[in-house]
Structures are given as structure tokens and as C-alpha cells.
Image (cartoon, grey):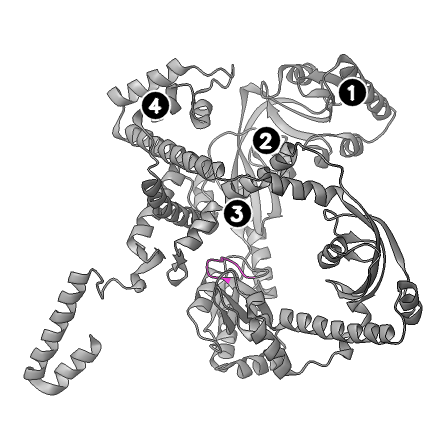
């Protein structure tokens, strides 16, 4: 279009008409063929078998997923991390729908209305339905309650409730179709008697043998000279070994921190001191907090469990108007003020415990668990530290916190536990039996029904605009003077800045090694060319300048990308050649038995009494699949003078084989083989479908 416009402008009206006619021809042809020039990949976030997933389509699904998240979280706003997860969920939904709709259609998989009804109120009720309609107090599920609720929604429900029901029905429909498909695919997994027989014999047939080995590690790396031309030749011959499984980039980057300066720290300390005084003098706590804090005033009276451990003691003991703080937590300074106090009807308690679970189902098992609890209780009463005993003997998640359960509401714990805590006082220790086992319980605080309203003045400790600006200017100067990789490295050396490397940056990563929220840096890497240097990219509280070192495409591998692995493999090949030559020289010199060869090369003969296929570990050597395969495929009493294994060069002799006893029933071995295959198919078919249908992810161009 731009070229045609230039021709028209420069060549007059006549050529303008020619240009217009050409454009109309192109548009007409595109419309008739269905390949619009305006529908390029520039507006798509992905493809399935060449069919586009448009940006608009993706954004619509993201909006849908965000709305569902907000509904589930009761309006809690999305942070950057959650938003990234929502986008990932939206992508997975679109890909799964795009792939599976074709599969369902091709295979004739459907879910009838009767089957959908069965998932709600039939004989095969879906777990989500049961969970939603099970009485939490009794644990009882009643179909009639489901029927009554569905009828009420359909007849009297508002549009929002009906929409929620339709969303749930869609979920059940898709889940039902997925399970049918998964079941169908798993039914196609089978194992034969021959497979089972091989497994049995590989496990039961053993070899007795002797061997010597010269490990590759006995040749120093310095003994292998690696020429660049030889390494490239080796790589070209073995490219299939180094194929990339996904698109990725290699980058170098330097980081400018804009952490708070000493001047910022001084300013922050002054702010804290001022707030301690001004907040204490404030007549209207609500107004003061709303004007001076990063959080709004919360007027709701709250219990002890709702406040941080390091302030709760003073908040619930000091008088109204008292200032508590400052405390520094999660990079924020916090100052609390007791704004109101009231007593409630609800009692809160605090205790620690050590749980002894009953291992077994007999009365003796229960008695043994109690005896153990009583032994530890006796030690505690003699002065042993409760927290240390909890860490040593506890069997639940509280053991790492010294058994501390924190503050809990009356009725929150199981009845027996709750009764002990409610009847006792601070310092009481005893044993309680519940459905979970035997507990040693220590009441750590007196009961309280007190509620406190506390104003909170909070401020994040961060770099000032001045500090941020200074760091940005420094980074900008570095970027402006680094127009190629040589400049980048030279400037980093001059300024004594560490160059960090990220070897495998994938197109949808949201991070770099050691740095979260690095999406912008990743996006830049996938839109740049090798050798490009970025402008300043802000990542969290840091500035980055990035150099793109290598582009790695799926299914391919560049020499630079594979250099490290290729060089290791090349060295291994050359070491093998040296060791093979050494062993051949010894054999040609007359060492034609294992004992003679071992003496010639000063090697130890290692006897192995029972080697099978299932165990590929070799005594004093480690795993070596190639060597084990060679041993079990060699005739008895044959001297093998040199064999290249995975870890070294071997000479060996098999003395005898012990064959597997004959059996006729291989069913257990068939089942053993089938189970992991079925699991692999069930959890891996989606990735296989993505490869079959050429799913292309282009989201990195937009996010």
C-alpha cells in the first residue's frame, strides 16, 4: 500500500488510477480466496493448523476469565502475577477448544442432555456438584436439594444467577467430553504377551561376568585438542542430537538498581518520626489515615487473629489513642493506633499442640499412640521445651512452628479440642483424644472476646523519584553508547557492571533468572535481531539493558546454541578413540585374556555375580546402559577385548547366564507396563495434539 501511494503521488492522476485498480484487484482476489491481506499474523496471537486465533478473540477470552476470577474472589483486584495466570488460562482454553472440537467432531463424541442431567442428579453425579451441594455440617449430599435449586434458578433466578448456571453447565459439558475422549484414547493403550515376557526376562535373566574399564574421566580435557573446524564438522554430522524443543533466546543483560539511597533512607526515617507524633495528635483517625496512608481506614473491629503477631500484644493491652510501632514488614513501614475497643460475644483462644496420629486401626495401635503422648507429656512437665518437642514429635503442619495454632474462634476446632481449651487457662497442658489422634495441648493465651479497631498508617520504603531518575539516566547513557555487542561488553567492563546471561528464555516466560516481572525484557528479546542492544527496559525496581546473543527456533539448533554440549560430546568421542587405541595396542601385544589385559594396563578385574537388564548400574562405575546391553547380548565364555560404553572403554567376559524360570501367566507384567503408558497418554495427549496440529504461540508479540 505504501509503495502504491508513493507511485500515485509522484506520477500523476493517470498512474493513480492504475494503482487504484491494482489495489481493487488485490482486495477482490483476497476476498474471493479467503486470504485477506488485512488478516495477517500481525493481528493474531496464535494459530492451529493455520487457522488464526485473533488478538480480539484472545482478549475476549481473557476478559471472560478475568470476570470469572473476580466473581470467585469476590472482587479482589488482579495483580500482575494473577493477570499473567489468567492470560495463560485463556490461551489454554482457546487452544483446547480449537483442538478438541475437531477431535470430537472427527470421532463423533457428544454429550447428550440425558448424560448432562445424569451429572447433576443421576447415578453419576459430578464431584463438583457433590461438593457444591453437600451440607458442610453433616457431610450429607441430597439430590432433592440440587433439583430444588435448579428449579428455583430456572423459574425465579435473576439473569446473573442463570448465567452462572449456564457457565457451570458448560464446564460440565466440556469436562464430560474430555473424559470421554481421554477414556477412548486410554482404551487404545495395550501391551502384548511378548512385551510382558521381555519385561519378565529382562528382570529375571542374569549374567555372571568379569570386566575391566578405562573411564573417559581418566583422560584429562587438556589432552583433547578441540579445533573450531573439527567441532563444527562434528556438530553438522550430529545436528539431530541438538534440536531445540521450543523457541527460545539467549541474552546477556546488565542491571542498574534504583534501590533507595542513603538520602532516601534519611527522608524515610524523618517521615516515620513525624507520623508517630502527628498520628498520636490526630483527632479524626479516619481522615488522617485516608490522607496519609497507602491504605484506607478500616473501621471494622477485629479480633487478635486478624493483626500481625508483632503488634497484637500492645494493640489489645494499650488504651485508646496509643501508638504501636513503627514496624518494618514486607518493605513497608507501619504505624498502628488503637482507635476503638469493644467486647464481643465470640470468644477467641490460643493454643499449641503436638499431634500423635494413630498408626493402624486396632485398639492396640490407639493405646500405643496414647502411651507415646503420655511419655512426651511427662518430659514437658519436667521442663522440656514444648516447641522443641513439637518440632521433634509433631505429625502435622504446625510442627515447624513449635505446634502453635495461633488464635482461633470458639467452635472452630473439633469438639474435644475446643472443650479443653475453653475450660482451661493460660499455661494448662494436657492430653486430648480427637478423630485425628492424641494431642498434647498447651493453652498459650487467656481467652479473649475483645475486639480492636486500629488505624494503620503505612508507607512503602522505595527509591525517590530523584534516585530513580538518576539510575535511569545512567542506564540510558549506557544504552546510547552500546550500539553493538562489542560496545556492550566494553562499557560493562569500564563501568564494572556484571554481565548476566539467560541461556533459555522462552517466548511466554514472565521472568529472567533472579528477576520476576520481566515480561517486557522477554518481549524485546523475541522482537529483536541477533546483535541488537535494547533501550532501557524497566523490570520491577531495576533497569536493564539487553543484548540478544542467539535466536533458537523450535526443531532447529544453531552451532552457538549447541556448542557446550557438542564440545562435551566431541571430547568424549576423542577420549574414546585414545582409550580404544590403548586397549587395542595391549591386545595386539599379546594380552588376549582378561587377566593378561588387566595386568598389561594395570587395571582391576571387577567380578559381577548377577547383572540384569532392569538394573543398569555397574559396580564401581555407575549407570551404563550400553555396556549392560552388550553384556546380556554376548555368548558365555567369549572374551570381548574392547567395547565403547556410555562411561568408558570396557573389556569383559561373561562366565554364565542364569535364565529366567519359565512361567505361563504374564498378566501382572502386562498390567505393570500398561499403567504408566495409560498415565502418559492421559496426561500427554494434549501436547501431542499441539504438535500434530501445529499450534503456534505468538502472544509474545503483544504481551
In the rendered view, tell whether residue 70 sits above or below residue 568: above
Q: Which quadrant holds residue 29?
A: bottom left
Question: Dots 3 and 2: beta carbons under 8 Å?
Answer: no
The residue where tag 3 is placed is: 458
Q: Which mark is residue 117?
A: 4
Q: Which of marks 3 and 4 is nearer the N terminus?
A: 4
Crowding near the residue tagged with mark 1, few <14, some 14–19, many ≥20 C-alpha atoms within 10 Å: some
The residue where tag 2 is placed is: 305
The residue where tag 1 is placed is: 369
Front position in the image: 371 or 360: 360
Q: Disc 2 versus disc 1: distance between alpha carbons?
A: 32 Å
Looking at the picture, how far across and down is residue 199, in whole percent?
A: 67, 43
Q: Earlier in the sequence, mark 3 or mark 1?
A: 1
Question: Dots 2 and 1: beta carbons under 8 Å?
Answer: no
Q: What element carries label 3?
A: strand
- Helix, strand or loop: magenta stretch: loop
Q: Which of marks 3 and 2 is nearer the N terminus?
A: 2
Front position in the image: 390 or 476: 390
Q: Earlier in the sequence, mark 4 or mark 1?
A: 4
Of labels 4 and 1, the one closer to you: 4
Amino acid at each position: 500500500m505504501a509503495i502504491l501511494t508513493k507511485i500515485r503521488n509522484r506520477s500523476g492522476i493517470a498512474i493513480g488510477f492504475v494503482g487504484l485498480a491494482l489495489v481493487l484487484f488485490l482486495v477482490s482476489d483476497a476476498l474471493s480466496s479467503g486470504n485477506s491481506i488485512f488478516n495477517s499474523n500481525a493481528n493474531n496471537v496464535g494459530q492451529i493448523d493455520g487457522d488464526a486465533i485473533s488478538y480480539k478473540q484472545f482478549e475476549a477470552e481473557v476478559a471472560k476469565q478475568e470476570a470469572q476470577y473476580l466473581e470467585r474472589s469476590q472482587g479482589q483486584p488482579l495483580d500482575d502475577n494473577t493477570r499473567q495466570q489468567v492470560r495463560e488460562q485463556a490461551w489454554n482454553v482457546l487452544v483446547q477448544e480449537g483442538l478438541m472440537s475437531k477431535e470430537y467432531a472427527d470421532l463423533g463424541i457428544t454429550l447428550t442432555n440425558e448424560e448432562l442431567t445424569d451429572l447433576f442428579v443421576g447415578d453419576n453425579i459430578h464431584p463438583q456438584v457433590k461438593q457444591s451441594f453437600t451440607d458442610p455440617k453433616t457431610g450429607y449430599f441430597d439430590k432433592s436439594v440440587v433439583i430444588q435449586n435448579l428449579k428455583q434458578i430456572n423459574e425465579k433466578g435473576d439473569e446473573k444467577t442463570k448465567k452462572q448456571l449456564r457457565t457451570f453447565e458448560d464446564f460440565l459439558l466440556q469436562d464430560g467430553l474430555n473424559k470421554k475422549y481421554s477414556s477412548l484414547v486410554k482404551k487404545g493403550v495395550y501391551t502384548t504377551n511378548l512385551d510382558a515376557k521381555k519385561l519378565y526376562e529382562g528382570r529375571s535373566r542374569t549374567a555372571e561376568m568379569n570386566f575391566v574399564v578405562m573411564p573417559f574421566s581418566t583422560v584429562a580435557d587438556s589432552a583433547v585438542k578441540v579445533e573450531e573446524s573439527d567441532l563444527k564438522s562434528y556438530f553438522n554430522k550430529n545436528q539431530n542430537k541438538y534440536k531445540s524443543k521450543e523457541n527460545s533466546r539467549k541474552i546477556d543483560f546488565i542491571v542498574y538498581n534504583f534501590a533507595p539511597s542513603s538520602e532516601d533512607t534519611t527522608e524515610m526515617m524523618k517521615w516515620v518520626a513525624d507520623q508517630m507524633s502527628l498520628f498520636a495528635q490526630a483527632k479524626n483517625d479516619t481522615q488522617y489515615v485516608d490522607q496519609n496512608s497507602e491504605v484506607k481506614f478500616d473501621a471494622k473491629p477485629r479480633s487478635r487473629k486478624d493483626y500481625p503477631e508483632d503488634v497484637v500484644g500492645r494493640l489489645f493491652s494499650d488504651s485508646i489513642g496509643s501508638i504501636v510501632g513503627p514496624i518494618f514488614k514486607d518493605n513497608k513501614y507501619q504505624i498502628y493506633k488503637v482507635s476503638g475497643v469493644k467486647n464481643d460475644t465470640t470468644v477467641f483462644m490460643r493454643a499449641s499442640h503436638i499431634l500423635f496420629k494413630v498408626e493402624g486401626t486396632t485398639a492396640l495401635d490407639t493405646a500405643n499412640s496414647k502411651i507415646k503422648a503420655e511419655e512426651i507429656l511427662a518430659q514437658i512437665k519436667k521442663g522440656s521445651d514444648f516447641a522443641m518437642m513439637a518440632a521433634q514429635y509433631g505429625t502435622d503442619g504446625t510442627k515447624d512452628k513449635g505446634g502453635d495454632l495461633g488464635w482461633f474462634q470458639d467452635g472452630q476446632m473439633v469438639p474435644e479440642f475446643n472443650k479443653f481449651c475453653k475450660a482451661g487457662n493460660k499455661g494448662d497442658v494436657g492430653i486430648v483424644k480427637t478423630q485425628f489422634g492424641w494431642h498434647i495441648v498447651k493453652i498459650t493465651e487467656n481467652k479473649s472476646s475483645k475486639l480492636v479497631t486500629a488505624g494503620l498508617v503505612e508507607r512503602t520504603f522505595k527509591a525517590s523519584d530523584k534516585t530513580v531518575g538518576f539510575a535511569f539516566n545512567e542506564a540510558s547513557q549506557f544504552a546510547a553508547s552500546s550500539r553493538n555487542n562489542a560496545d556492550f561488553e566494553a562499557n560493562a567492563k569500564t563501568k564494572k557492571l556484571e554481565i548476566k546471561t539467560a541461556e533459555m528464555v522462552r517466548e511466554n516466560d514472565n521472568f529472567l533468572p533472579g528477576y520476576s516481572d520481566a515480561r517486557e525484557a522477554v518481549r524485546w528479546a523475541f522482537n529483536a535481531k541477533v546483535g541488537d542492544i535494547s533501550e532501557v527496559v524497566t523490570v520491577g525496581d531495576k533497569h536493564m539493558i539487553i543484548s540478544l546473543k542467539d535466536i533458537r527456533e523450535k526443531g532447529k539448533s544453531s552451532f552457538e546454541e549447541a556448542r557446550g554440549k557438542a564440545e562435551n560430546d566431541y571430547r568424549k568421542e576423542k577420549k574414546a578413540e585414545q582409550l580404544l587405541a590403548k586397549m587395542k595396542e595391549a591386545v595386539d601385544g599379546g594380552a588376549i585374556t582378561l587377566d593378561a589385559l588387566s595386568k598389561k594396563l594395570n587395571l582391576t578385574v571387577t567380578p559381577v555375580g548377577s547383572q540384569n537388564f532392569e538394573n543398569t548400574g555397574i559396580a564401581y562405575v555407575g549407570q551404563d546402559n550400553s555396556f549392560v546391553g552388550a553384556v546380556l547380548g554376548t555368548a558365555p565364555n567369549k572374551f570381548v577385548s574392547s567395547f565403547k560404553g556410555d562411561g568408558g572403554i570396557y573389556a569383559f567376559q561373561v562366565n554364565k547366564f542364569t535364565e529366567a524360570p519359565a512361567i505361563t501367566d504374564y498378566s501382572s507384567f502386562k498390567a505393570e507396563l500398561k499403567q504408566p503408558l495409560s498415565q502418559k497418554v492421559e496426561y500427554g495427549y494434549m501436547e501431542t495434539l499441539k504438535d500434530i496440529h501445529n499450534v503456534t504461540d505468538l502472544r509474545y508479540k503483544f504481551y
